Amino acid sequence: MKNVFKASAIALALAISTQVTAAEINFSTKINNKAQTLVVFYSQDANNSAFNDIDKQFKNQLSHTIDIKQFDGKYGDILEVIPTNSRKHQRVFIVGTGKLQQLDKSTIAKLGGNVHATLLQNKVESASIVFDSVKGAISNPELAANFAHGANLRDHRFEKYKQTPNTVTVSYYFDVDDKKQTNNTYSTLQSIEQGVFLARDLTSEVATQMTPVAFAKAAKELEALGVEITVLEPKELKELGMGALEAVGRGSEQGARLVVAHYKGSNTTPIALVGKGITFDSGGYSIKTGASIARMKSDMAGAAAVLGTVKAMALAKADKNVVAVMGMAANMVSQFAVAPGDVVRTAEGLSVEIVNTDAEGRLVLSDAMWYARKHFNPEIMIDVATLTGSKIKAVGNDYAGVFSQDDTLISQLTLAGKQVNENLWRLPLGYKSTLSSDIADLKNLGSSGPGATTAASFLEHFAGETRWVHIDIAGNALATKGKDEISPGGTGFGVRLLSEWLLSN
Ligand code: BES
Ligand code: MG
Ligand code: ZN
């Protein structure tokens, strides 16, 4: 099947000039015998009848290699065979699936990612994936579509600054037991991919290019999909009393922006997604030093994730009412920047003593959360933010931290995350009293207590009566190397999780 979203992918490519995905996916009910390479699955617990048939065609060369290499079908192991005298395929990859019942959305997408990386490494241009006989915990169409999804996700890289970007395209031919069903599932996953790719590209782009104004411009492109975009300028932020967001933006020439992206696919009460959009976090006068400053172009990944999610919902034409509210600013040093000790007033009314200008995320979020509640009165509000180094110390880069008083939302979101390899780990709220200030209603730094929690508890002041969840994605947003369905650069963490949650609840 041709990529039905080519047009929008190209529009995005022009805007922030990135590549269009280079895996081409075809589903059919027959095995393609012309592809250069054949990929067959080998499980630890089934009779592997498809494998055995193919092995016979290759005069038992596959089973022979398996014996010598002591390959036993362990999940994720990939064995290469170069058959002699094959008129059809130059090579065969045997892919271990582990026990078939363990094959679900998340495990098959990872396999898709890893097989794709192997094919790229071997400069394979076309591959026939023998899929029809593969059954797992979910149906064959779901498995095939999610495998293709994993391959596409792994394929997407940010190489616009390279003299010779990778241009290899792998054409995939899957034989599946139900073509229509597979295409249906795949089409939703393609919408989600486009949301992930947008979030990744926005995050990967360098900070001098990806400014608050550039981000707002990229958001505007979603208007073509029927998404309503509103951008508030510094003057309007001031008029609305959004002193916290305005203050963080004051140190850079462009100042702050509030960007709102509303996709109204139904008339229900909206779900609000609030994103931290610090296009560069120098720390401000509480300046970051050494390695801690190096990757701070990615401090807008929360905003990118919520915008990507809205794009995914719009492309999927989901019957959801979802609005992303993004607080955008560059946290820089200049004669106009906020000084430690300054007091600002949030739109909510609470004044905040800025003890540390590097704790800026909670400031922009406080006003963005206020705006989301005031203008949309949402049923649920979820904020996504690269908020604290403390979260990385607590749970590392493979989990995001999740905070809420709402047990139901925590379990729904955690489950959704598991399905898509974007795992959440619950951390506590609390230590509120450590945020009390001598001269203002609150200070932006807890005097004691765990940093990820005091940051979350600061935000809780701005959630009011709304059901609210905070997701701290510090460390999840930018990958240094490829792994599973992740390629180096912006990860788009949060788009798949939120899309999965929205579409299944
Ligand atoms: N953007 C950072 C958090 C961060 C750290 C994200 C590492 C990704 C990787 C945030 O604005 C920040 O500077 N947090 C400080 C807070 C401190 C000053 C209370 C931190 O975590 O060190
Ligand atoms: Mg900071
Ligand atoms: Zn920050």
Image (spheres, rainbow, N blue to C red):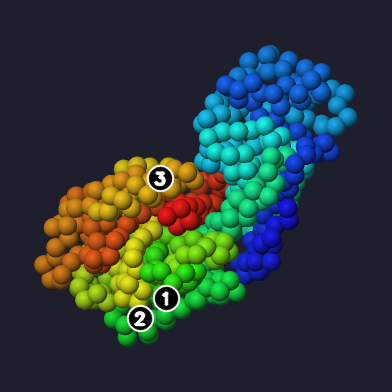
Q: Taking the image as drawn, is residue 465 in sight?
A: yes
Q: Residue at x 39, y 58 (%)?
A: 384
Q: CA distance from mark 2 to mark 3?
A: 37 Å
Q: What residue did someone put label 1 on?
A: 257
Q: Which residue is mark 2?
A: 237
Please report contact status of discs 2 and 3: CB closer than 8 Å, yes or no.
Answer: no
Q: Amino acid at mark 1?
A: Arg
Disc sitting over residue 430 in the figure: none
Q: Which residue is mark 3?
A: 415
Q: Position of residue 387 (x, y in %)?
A: 35, 56
Which element is circle 1 on? Answer: strand
C-alpha separation, residue under disc 1 versus residue under disc 2: 8 Å
Label 2, residues with CA under 10 Å away: few <14, some 14-19, many ≥20: some
Tell me if 22 is positioned left or right of 387 in this view.
right
SS of the residue at dot 2? Answer: helix
Query: Residue 208: in sight, yes or no?
Result: no
